[in-house]
Amino acid sequence: MPEAYNPNSEATNKEKVIAGHWELLRRNKEFRSVSKLWLASEKFRRKHALGPVYCDMQNHTPRCAWDWMLTAKERVRLARYQIETWAWLLDREFNFGPIVCRQNFAAAAVTRQNLRSFVRVEPMRYAPPPLTVSQSWDCTPDEFKRQFQRAYSSAYEFGEINSRLAEIGKLLRIMSKKLDADDPLKEIPVIASFLCEFGSELRNTAEFWKVFKIPRSRVSEKQFKLFLGQINDAFKVDGLLVPTKKYDTHKSYQGTDEDWRWFLMAESRGLDIRKSADARKLAEIYSEDLRQRKMRGKAPRRAVAHGHTGTKFSSRVIKNRRSTVKRHVLAVEKWIRSAYPRRKPDPGSASS
């Protein structure tokens, strides 16, 4: 039996998080249920495409996945319906799926009357087969991966934005002076285009970042810690802080490597951890695996092998190991439940 895909096998923390989110999302029962309806009925798709979950600007990933579940022709038909109903996003990067979008004029000039002629949507040439919830991350199309990463991460990199804000401020002042001078160089269309771009950038900044104003001046360490405490509280209120306890966030976020290993083992063998016989079977596999790793010197130092290859494990050992594997499996299941729609993870889901 080939080894199941583990998102923690990706090379970087960023890739692990993105891959992990897809692996959790595609296993979420509610997401799978909606996806089934989405594929079965164009009428449902049209209704759902105008609904709050699909249009949730705080959580783009389900919409990205649904758009890639369509054929290129189906996605084009849906796009045309979105344009007709004013549900099309003017930011091209947030319209997903196997389509190519070409703007006919600047976004700043868009009105309800000319939206239909604003963008031309065409099917992607050589589009890959539609995405399915049965595809693990390593088997999904490259273009979907790029768009899904954008949908999940967008502008989440940490860093100062002072220089960019200063640049935008400077350009806005220049534009205002030109407009105040009655536009002698006839640049209003160009200015309008820049204003629209700046507006989109500032809106995205407010949407995907938390921006705090801290004075750039000398402050005591005590005062600075008070600032950090207020930032911490703001993240807590919005449910954006994940409890990590003694674990590093990237090692435990969305499940540790061991959590996924034993969740995937149970899943691939059809073992239900809530059934006594299945839990025992998984505990036996875990115990034998630990024994073999101990013999090769690859197990944790304090791990006990409990006998030699082929010997049975005592009921006491199996009982303890049942608790261990159950904890691993349940940890991933908690993350699966929190994947759709994305929200604050269940308490304790970050540590196992």
Image (cartoon, rainbow, N blue to C red):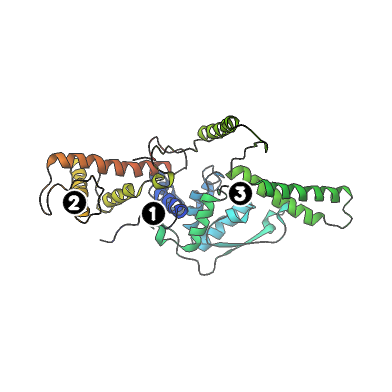
Q: What residue appears at the point 19 percent right and 48 percent down from the top-left corner?
A: 287
Residue type (three-letter) at the residue carrying disc 1:
Pro
Report the mark closest to the observer, 3 or 2: 2
Image side of residue 284 versus residue 328, left or right:
left
Q: Is mark 1 on a helix, strand or loop?
A: helix
Q: Residue at x 40, y 48 (%)?
A: 24
The span from disc 3 to disc 2 (Cα, nearest Å) is 58 Å
- Which secondary structure lies at badge 3? loop
Identify the mark nearer the N-term, 3 or 1: 1
Residue 82 visible within the image:
yes
Residue 45: x and y in percent read 50, 51
30, 332: nearer the viewer? 332
Does 192 sit above or below residue 337?
Answer: below
Q: Is residue 133 rendered to the left or right of residue 66?
A: left
The numbered mark, 3 or 2, whose residue comes first in the sequence reads 3
Residue 273 can be seen in this image? no
The residue carrying mark 1 is: 7
The numbered dot on residue 294 is none
Query: Which of label 1 and label 2 is nearer to you?
Result: 2
The location of residue 219, given as percent across then percent down, is 64, 33
Name the residue beneath numbered marker 2.
291
Of residues 44 and 129, the one nearer the viewer is 129
Q: Position of residue 76 (x, y in %)?
A: 56, 60
- Between the C-alphas of marks 3 and 1, the distance is 34 Å
In percent of the image, x 21 and y 52: which residue is there? 294
Residue under pointer 3: 87
Q: Which of 340 and 44 is in front in this view?
A: 340
Mark 1 or 2, nearer chain start: 1
State the residue in front, 97 or 237: 237
